[in-house]
Image (spheres, coloured by chain):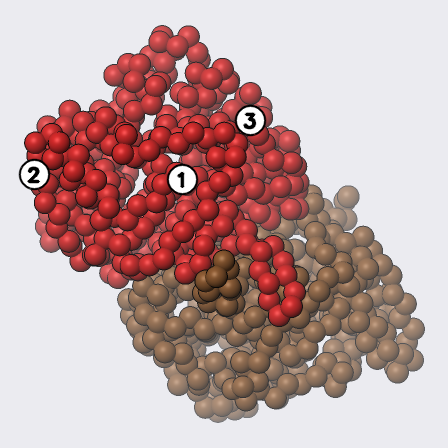
Chain colours: A red, B brown
Amino acid sequence: MRILVLGGDGYCGWATSLYLSSRGHQVAIADSFHRRLWDHELGAQSLTPIRALPERLRVWHAVSGQTIEPFVGDITDYEFVASSFQAFEPETVIHFAEQRAAPYSMIDRQHAVFTQVNNVVGTLNVLFAIKEFSPNCHLVKLGTMGEYGTPNIDIEEGYIRIQHNGREDLLPFPKQPGSFYHLSKVHDSHNIMFCCKIWGIRATDLNQGVVYGTVTAEVSLDEALINRFDYDEVFGTALNRFCVQAAIGHPLTVYGSGGQTRGFLDIRDTVRCIELACINPPERGECRVFNQFTEQFSVLELAELVQSAAHKMGIDAPIDHLPDPRVEAEEHYYNARHTKLLDLGLRPHLLSESLLDSLVNIAFQYRDRIDASLLLPKVDWRNSRNDRRQRPAAMAAAAD
Amino acid sequence: MRILVLGGDGYCGWATSLYLSSRGHQVAIADSFHRRLWDHELGAQSLTPIRALPERLRVWHAVSGQTIEPFVGDITDYEFVASSFQAFEPETVIHFAEQRAAPYSMIDRQHAVFTQVNNVVGTLNVLFAIKEFSPNCHLVKLGTMGEYGTPNIDIEEGYIRIQHNGREDLLPFPKQPGSFYHLSKVHDSHNIMFCCKIWGIRATDLNQGVVYGTVTAEVSLDEALINRFDYDEVFGTALNRFCVQAAIGHPLTVYGSGGQTRGFLDIRDTVRCIELACINPPERGECRVFNQFTEQFSVLELAELVQSAAHKMGIDAPIDHLPDPRVEAEEHYYNARHTKLLDLGLRPHLLSESLLDSLVNIAFQYRDRIDASLLLPKVDWRNSRNDRRQRPAAMAAAAD
């Protein structure tokens, strides 16, 4: 299958591109390298050292014999999207090419506007390109479980059957996103659903949970293929932060009580879920939604799992509770359905089995590269600044 | 009350500004004149001749003794929003300043992207300005009944109590918007709800039905104060189109079977609804939603009402059914709640009473200005063009 991976140089995109290439698909990567740019802006970097894309692709060809073609450009530029579609003629487009960090979108007004415009316009361009050049092409779009928020009812996969005043309908599940980034994904979801309806586009919207892990079979083949491990407060997730904190003997910093519960999955399951979506496409006109995660944990449970894993390595990792910089329920009901990918054949990796190998050990291996100043929260939901930032976050924080 | 009307030079904005000014509020208008620009782009114009804003404001001062201060600029420019807030210090901001035509958003990719970026960024800027300069200011935002689409259950006012698997929650009503424009309003609604939650902003989201009528007590005071009457296929509504068609002896063109049912209201009720929202503000942090319409009609019912009114004037107005250029259900259930504004004291004007005075007679009075080529649908939901338009719609249509 000819698969175009938008954002294929990023964390999920890179692992997915190599996995699909190893499975015999013909893969191309489109990327603008904005993810690398944001590292420079924030004064942060991946814990693991990431090679430039040409080197990554050269090494991948050497170790696998497979060729992945790169398209360099920004999908908010329609001419770029159009020329990539015309050159590669994809049967499936996997769309990872968005600004994906909630804290980044909450830095200030400019970052909020950038995130929404970047994500919404990029996705609109992809939808128009499919309509114009490849109407049969399947769009596999990365959404997020964060689109749903934390309602007091069970979360379904995209749609919910509602009975009301003696009538009923199957309607889009109500969304309560918790950042300008999560809002951008909700905007995308509505736009995609509409384009499927009016143009007969086929789409799978994958509402993904929090992805953890660095290791997949493919990226392990050579050090030049290693994947990102983000631990800074903006792009890192709580689980990565805890592993890095344990590795340098820093207390694990839980925001608030730690009762915030979310869905999680191993990156080895991400790549498999994506392939399952690709090889089982929906009908023309269908906008299918899968909840892509395998286990639910609270933040405090994650901290305790890391604490326990660290303990086995002889490390003491106390847990600190910080004021929550986000506006979110610290204790809430959470039960989200996630059976559709299991029905297609997903066999989950569980966190308990991969925690040491793929997380704590990586953090230890690269602990000399850890910058502890990147760990603490500086972006505050209640005080998103407007246009006042003149300096990168790291510098501003240092001066505050 | 100090009220800043964003988009105060437009159809609803102008009538609202004069009404609020006549009621003793201190009113300022911010406008970019994009609405006037789009007329030039489309080769269209209001049936009624509209004066320039400075003349309108001069005449209003002469007839009423009231002063309305103009701020000229675009709310997608944050510096403009910020300086207007600092200069006027509004207690209430009424936000009409969006691209509001579904067909305009469906012309091609550029118009879709423009509509969503323009509307979403403008609203984000207003939200950030309230947070930065006037955290107590009440945002009165114009949404649309079209955000809901046509679900097979009763439409509630913004939120619906859902029982599911033995639990329940009050959640945002699921949205199924039918154009890139309607989608932009859904994006806005989610953004506003979020900002109310995290920053304690107070907002009223008015999901307005289709507004009809030209005459209000204020705009009738002088010909220089006359309001817009749009009848072109892009910015005109079906009801205005029917009145204009009757006035020139053209058959009334119904899209499809005409069973498409929507909520409608007289512009005299629009201005009153807005004032009711302003003088009864919600609490800090509350995002309140009112459905702002007074009666439901199907498109065919509207055509028959115009036919009957024309008959009284001795005019024969046959009804033609055209293929529907939109993707929408032509027959569907529709029952939308609209009690909250009635509870605040709204006394509706009914279409049956105002049809002749405010619509058919106006169409007759200005029938020499009618350009019949603007009446027929050229924008097709199924064939939104991409980047290929080089010519204004009217010129392109003439050449097609």
Give the mark nearest the N terminus, 3 or 2.
3
Parent chain of label 1: A
The answer as to whether the residues below labels 3 and 1 share one chain is yes
**Depth check: A180 or A266 in front?**
A266
Residue type at mark 3 is Ile
The residue that label 2 is drawn on is A316
Instruction: Specify the label residue A71 is tagged with.
Output: none
**Residue ID at (45%, 65%):** B169
Q: Amino acid at mark 1?
A: Phe
The Cα–Cα distance between marks 3 and 2, rounded to whole angstroms, is: 45 Å
In this view, the residue in front, B365 or A221, is A221
Q: Chain under label 3?
A: A
Quickly name the residue at label 3.
A279
Q: Check if mark 3's residue and mark 2's residue have beta carbons within 8 Å.
A: no
In x, y percent, where is residue B125? 38, 61
Q: Is residue A213 left or right of residue B286?
A: left
Mark in front: 3 vs 2:
2
Q: Name which quarter of the figure residue A109 lies in.
A: bottom left
| Secondary structure type for disc 1 | loop
Mark 2: which amino acid? Asp
